[in-house]
Image (cartoon, rainbow, N blue to C red):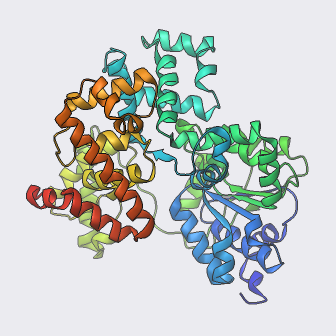
Amino acid sequence: MGKNFLNELNEAQRRAVEATEGPVLVIAGAGSGKTRVLTYRVAHLLQNGVDPFQILALTFTNKAAREMRERITSLVSHGQARSVWMGTFHSIFARILRIDGHWMGYPPNYTIYDTDDSKSVLRTLVKEMGLDPKLYAANIILNRISAAKSSLISAADYNENPELLAQDKQNARPLIGTIYTAYQSRLFRAAAMDFDDLLFNTNLLLRDHPEILFKYQKKFAYILVDEFQDTNYSQYLITKKLSADNENICVVGDDAQSIYAFRGANIENILNLKNDYPSLQVFKLEQNYRSTKNIVQAANSIIEKNKKQIQKEVWTDNPEGNKIEILKAVSDSEEGVLVADAIFKAKMNFHIKNEDCAILYRTNAQSRSMEEALRKKNIPYRIYGGVSFYQRKEIKDLLAYFRLSINHRDEEALTRIINYPTRGIGKTSIEKLVARAGEINIPLWNLLEDRQQCAAAGIHSGTVNKIVDFVAMIKSFAVKINTLSAYEAAKQITGSTGIMKELHEDRTP
């Protein structure tokens, strides 16, 4: 990094970067160089002798974290950039819980359940309780539990909250609180946490163990938070606790870009920040480097109607640009036709390439009408945000072998692969084993290791032998995972289990 790197910033950006001590709020309008301010601020701290291990930078996406680290690496040494604690809220707090989660009864190798895992657990519980699976749909229950955790409401607190219980009763789902309790118990038995637990449990850890809070307060001398307008109550409380010692916290955001209230984001966090930090310094990045004057003017004219906001004057030196065209459609199919026609005309009249066009829609359901219209016009397209690589069945199956080998208590992984590929341990046997484990309140894996308990569950001796073989295989994988690279371990697992053979025979693309 050159000595005069701050000269690359405009005046507002530079002042925000240089204000390193005390609480700072950077209001960053769209296209105003927000990421540059964050990265240069970290680089500035490092250049002034701050230990990289004492810097915590929190983002909302892995992509943002990667981009920040790459930019910082271009300004300072690779070793310094790599040593900064930088990542998403969930990844950083997962890291903390792997270090100190034992205070709450979790092993360092606990499993993180994704949404599909959580829904699977909930469907199992609903079935065990004999409830209507349509009324108690997994996504409805999970949304309810997630909202509770975002507000730091535990299962015990939920079941003592008259307002929440009344809402559930009014919605004909009076047992959601009971399911919440059973869900948390099932996760703990499996040494697992869901995504919301990563925030919820970090809050509990810092609240109930002052010595742990003190350790991280001393460790993180400087805290930076990106997209602060999207933080929920739980995220805000953690950052507030961690910064309480010296208040060297810098948050960057824009109240005008808050769109995640439906996911629990609380706009009050950014609007009322000064209440918790009376000495707060506020810097406004108001020059837009990205958009045309027409777009900036249109955005300003809309947001100015908002009476509850942090005032700013966003402007740009960019050209006027094309005027914004508004199309009104009477149906989703007509909307698709209008969009496809507009792209077709732009291609014909202005020789625009397909890759220069983008369609943004609010919900996934809207893509169907767009796709149909594009196909009729023979316009090729690519959809982003579909089923991700890690959500494909064959990938989740393989990852389940890794998960179970690392954490034998991971019940979702266990039930997913105990008979995949088919090894003669049928659905009925699995249900009996799960029920027996619940009766005697032990992890399912512990039951599988005990021949007598398997027999007590009503499992035939031939099936018990297959279970013994399965357990031995997983234990052998656990050894290999610790000695081989991930790639070599995956080759061993797919080969010795017969997964690769089954995929070749299936021929599914």
Q: Residue at x 16, y 40 (%)?
A: 424
Q: Quadrant of residue 201?
A: top right
Vertical arrangement, residue 220 with respect to residue 453, above or below: below
View extreme (front): residue: 452
Q: Is residue 266 visible?
A: no
- Image coordinates of residue 47 in percent, x first then y, are 79, 80
Q: Residue at x 19, y 36 (%)?
A: 463
Q: Looking at the rendering, in which quadrant would you find the C terminus?
A: bottom left
View extreme (bottom): residue: 2
Q: Which one is in front, 96 or 275?
A: 96
Q: Looking at the rendering, in which quadrant would you find the N terminus?
A: bottom right
- Image coordinates of residue 23 in percent, x first then y, are 84, 55
Q: Which one is in front, 41 or 496?
A: 496
On the picture, is 157 further left or further right than 416?
Answer: right
Vertical arrangement, residue 95 with respect to residue 434, above or below: below
On the picture, is 129 further left or further right than 21?
Answer: left
Q: Quadrant of residue 276?
A: top right
- Count numbered badges in the picture: 0
Q: Which one is in front, 62 or 402?
A: 402
Q: Is residue 389 visible?
A: yes
- Image coordinates of residue 344 in percent, x first then y, are 23, 64
Vertical arrangement, residue 325 with respect to residue 411, above or below: below
- Image coordinates of residue 237 in percent, x first then y, are 73, 41
Q: Residue at x 74, y 75 (%)?
A: 10
On the picture, is 454 further left or further right than 312?
Answer: left
Q: Which one is in front, 323 or 400?
A: 400
